[in-house]
Image (spheres, helix red, strand yellow):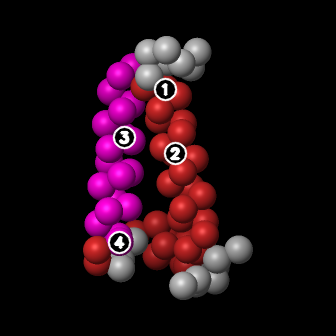
Amino acid sequence: MTSWKLVRIIAGLLILLSLALGVSESPLFVSQYWLYFTAFIGVNLFQSGLTNWCLMENILRKLGIRAGC
């Protein structure tokens, strides 16, 4: 698996987790402030789309995951 795919998998997982923890109708609800984490992830994805730079991809590459396009 490439770093490109892993970044999207990790981002999707974190978004779903933060929604589960932040939406009051969820059985896993903790606090509505978890929705700020969802927004933070969205802003980072938006920024990486504009600048072609992603910190998570750099971290994964240093961990030995091969780069993807």
> Where, by quadrant of the figure, is residue 48 drawn?
bottom left
Type of amino acid at the residue the image marks with label 4: Gly
Marks 4/1: CA–CA distance: 26 Å
Asked if the residues shown at circle 2 and circle 1 are in contact, with their CB atoms under 8 angstroms apart, the answer is no
Marks 1/3: CA–CA distance: 10 Å
Marks 4/3: CA–CA distance: 18 Å
Residue 30 visible, this angle? no
Earlier in the chain: of badge 4 and badge 3, it is: 3
Q: Which mark is residue 14?
A: 2
Q: Which mark is residue 44?
A: none
Q: Which mark is residue 49?
A: 4
Q: Secondary structure at mark 3?
A: helix
Type of amino acid at the residue the image marks with label 2: Leu
| Residue 46 shown left or right of residue 9 in the figure | left
Marks 3/2: CA–CA distance: 9 Å
Check disc 3 and report the residue beneath it.
37
Please tell me how crowded label 1 is: few (under 14), some (14-19), or many (20+) other residues with Cα within 10 Å. Answer: many
Magenta-highlighted residues: 31-49
x then y, percent, for residue 22: 43, 25
Q: Secondary structure at mark 2?
A: helix
Earlier in the chain: of badge 1 and badge 3, it is: 1
Please tell me how crowded label 3 is: few (under 14), some (14-19), or many (20+) other residues with Cα within 10 Å. Answer: some
Residue 64 visible, this angle? yes
Check disc 1 and report the residue beneath it.
21
Earlier in the chain: of badge 2 and badge 1, it is: 2
Earlier in the chain: of badge 4 and badge 1, it is: 1
Q: Secondary structure at mark 1?
A: helix
